Image (cartoon, rainbow, N blue to C red):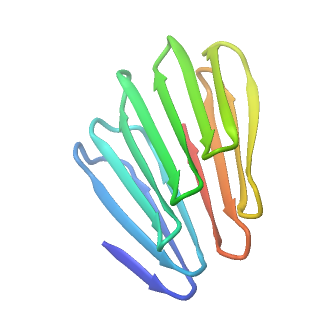
Amino acid sequence: MFTLQNKGSYNSTVIKDRSKLVVFTLQNKGSYNPDSINQHGSQVVFTFQNKGSYNSVGQQNIQSGVVFTLQNKGSYNFQRFANTFTSAVFTLQNKGRYNKRFFYTINIMAVFTLQNKGSYNTLSEGLVGTQAVFTLQNKGSYNNLMF
């Protein structure tokens, strides 16, 4: 478990680990940047204190699931089945629902904004790589680049 108080950053590269578990917590602000080469059973849990959590479970060539939740604000659910399709569901409490599914051979960009809290930006290039950037206004940022 890695914990930064008030500010700072953590950068981790995972290359060879069949059941790597990383838990990272930021208090108030900071950033987390993992550069991960897909491995079986790789798991990342990212938490903003009193704001929400990010949970990513990736299994190479099988499926990847991402769930992002902001406390009392909504949730983001992203599940990818390799070489098949990508499904994204984003829900804001009492605001509405966004559901998008697309085939993996199509490039697509999606931007999700949390009212007065920040934004989520994901750019997916089929069979090439996925880049996701999540920013909480005045709180910190999450940047995930996976090949």
The total of numbered circles placed on residues is 0
Q: Which residue is drawn at 56% across and 83% down?
A: 8
Q: Hey, which quadrant is residue 146 in on the image? A: top right
Q: In this view, does 83 lie above or below 9?
A: above
Q: Is residue 64 left or right of residue 118?
A: left
Image quarter in which the N terminus is found: bottom left
Q: Hey, which quadrant is residue 112 in on the image? A: top right
**Residue most toward the bottom?**
6
From the top left corner, tell me how far across and down residue 108 is, in percent. Answer: 74, 25
Q: Is residue 122 above or below residue 3?
A: above
From the top left corner, tell me how far across and down residue 124 is, in percent. Answer: 67, 31
Image quarter in which the C terminus is found: top right
Q: Hey, which quadrant is residue 89 in on the image? A: top right
Q: In this view, does 43 lie to the left or right of 54?
A: left
Nearer the observer, 77 or 147: 77
Q: Is residue 104 above or below residue 110?
A: above
Q: Residue at x 38, y 56 (%)?
A: 45
Q: Which residue is drawn at 33% across and 48% down?
A: 43
From the top left corner, tell me how far across and down residue 5 is, in percent. Answer: 48, 88
Q: Residue at x 65, y 75 (%)?
A: 139
Q: Is residue 101 left or right of residue 42?
A: right
From the top left corner, tell me how far across and down residue 99 is, in percent. Answer: 63, 25
